[in-house]
Amino acid sequence: AWKKLEDKVRRWACGEKKITVITGPLLEGANLSLQSGLKVPQSFYKVIVDESPPKKIISFIYHQEDEEDVMKERVVSFIQLQKKA
């Protein structure tokens, strides 16, 4: 599922003057840890900002167990994402 999102972002970027992509883990509910003590995130976020006028933004939260093309179900508002991060 994550690879499909990555591929879609690359296609969106083609032909745009400037986009910014921000990706990271969400540690909320991260109960598993590696032997090193590093937490294993249960979810990841991606924010895509199209800087070309008119400026647009889209945010996603994906889960470790996502396997199918769940892009439409994983769209969240940037405000929702900020509350979880």
Image (tube, rainbow, N blue to C red):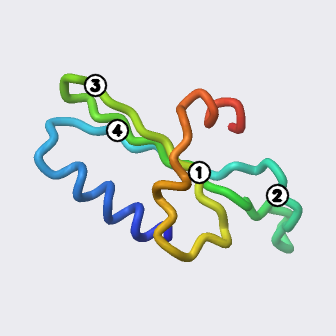
Q: Earlier in the sequence, mark 4 or mark 2?
A: 4
Mark 1, mark 4: which one is toward the viewer?
1
- Determine the secondary structure under disc 1: strand
- Determine the secondary structure under disc 3: loop
Instruction: Give the CA separation, mark 4 to mark 2.
Output: 27 Å
Residue under numbered circle 3? 55
Q: In the visual, does 81 lie left or right of 38?
A: left
Q: Nearer the viewer, residue 40 or 67?
A: 67
Task: Determine which of the numbered discs, if any, sits on residue 30 in the image.
Answer: 2
* Residue sitting at x 59%, y 58%: 62
Q: In the visual, does 42 lie left or right of 19?
A: right
* Residue sitting at x 56%, y 76%: 67
Residue under numbered circle 4? 20
Instruction: Give the CA separation, mark 2 to mark 3.
Output: 34 Å
* Residue sitting at x 14%, y 36%: 17
Task: Determine which of the numbered discs, if any, sits on residue 81 in the image.
Answer: none
Residue under numbered circle 1? 61
Instruction: Give the CA separation, mark 3 to mark 1.
Output: 21 Å
Which residue type does callout 2 highlight? Ala
The x and y percentages for residue 31 are: 88, 62
Q: Earlier in the sequence, mark 2 or mark 1?
A: 2
